[in-house]
Image: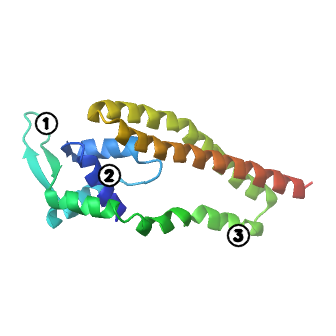
Amino acid sequence: MSLRHGLIGLLNYGSMTGYELNKVFKDSLSFFWQAKSSQIYRELDAMERRGWLTSERVIQDGKANKRGYSVTDSGMAEFHGWLSTPEADIDDALHVSSAFFMRVFFAGETSGEQSIALLRAYRDKCAEQSRGMGAAHGAIARYKDAVDDDAKARHWKLTAMYGEAFYRAGMEWADKAIAMLEGESQ
């Protein structure tokens, strides 16, 4: 499961609390991988049981205690094993499982106005996400300074480039689809 590997990859840069991991995850990976806070904490517990992580309870005065996580040698072995078998994930990158596109497929059962409204909403969401890519670049710059490693930052930028292209393609597709449906209704 890639969520686990993403968390190990982030912890490779240094120990973090669950809260910090959740923030870094959302800053850096959320435009191509979605995870709720509850999923992240559940995965951290499971990875600790597998021996991929260790945790240390940090007692705080006047605040809730927190738990700091670190990757073990076993966790790094799992992470590097996952990295060395990319062909296992390529099919995931090529296939889309989307309730939205299932809805588009069957939208001929609705009115043309409903279909166009659906496509406009999708285009608006793509545009909003595209504008948000600036935050991803800002996070990349901050984390690059924190880890002081240009090679890693270049790879982070590659995923940001994909995010930008993905949202741009979504907007272009939506524009063409709207034009096609509007042309049919005239």
**Along the viewing direction, whichever of 178 and 88 lies nearer the viewer:** 88
Residue drawn at (72%, 65%) of the image:
107
Q: Which residue is mark 2?
A: 37
Mark 1 packing: few (<14 Cα in 10 Å), some, or many (20+)? Answer: few
Disc 2 residue type (three-letter)? Ser
Question: Could you tell me how far apart the alpha carbons at marks 2 and 1 are, in whole angstroms?
Answer: 20 Å
- Left or right for 17, reference 156: left
The mark that comes first in sequence, 3 or 2, is 2
Q: Which residue is mark 3?
A: 106
Residue 78 seen from this side:
yes
Question: Could you tell me how far apart the alpha carbons at marks 1 and 3 are, in whole angstroms?
Answer: 52 Å
**Along the viewing direction, whichever of 179 and 162 lies nearer the viewer:** 162
Secondary structure at numbered mark 1: loop
Secondary structure at numbered mark 3: helix
- Residue lying furthest right: 186
Residue 183, how many percent across, how many down?
A: 88, 54
In this view, 140 is above or below 81: above
The mark that comes first in sequence, 1 or 3, is 1
In this view, 146 is above or below 44: above
The mark that comes first in sequence, 2 or 1, is 2
In the image, which disc is placed on residue 63? 1
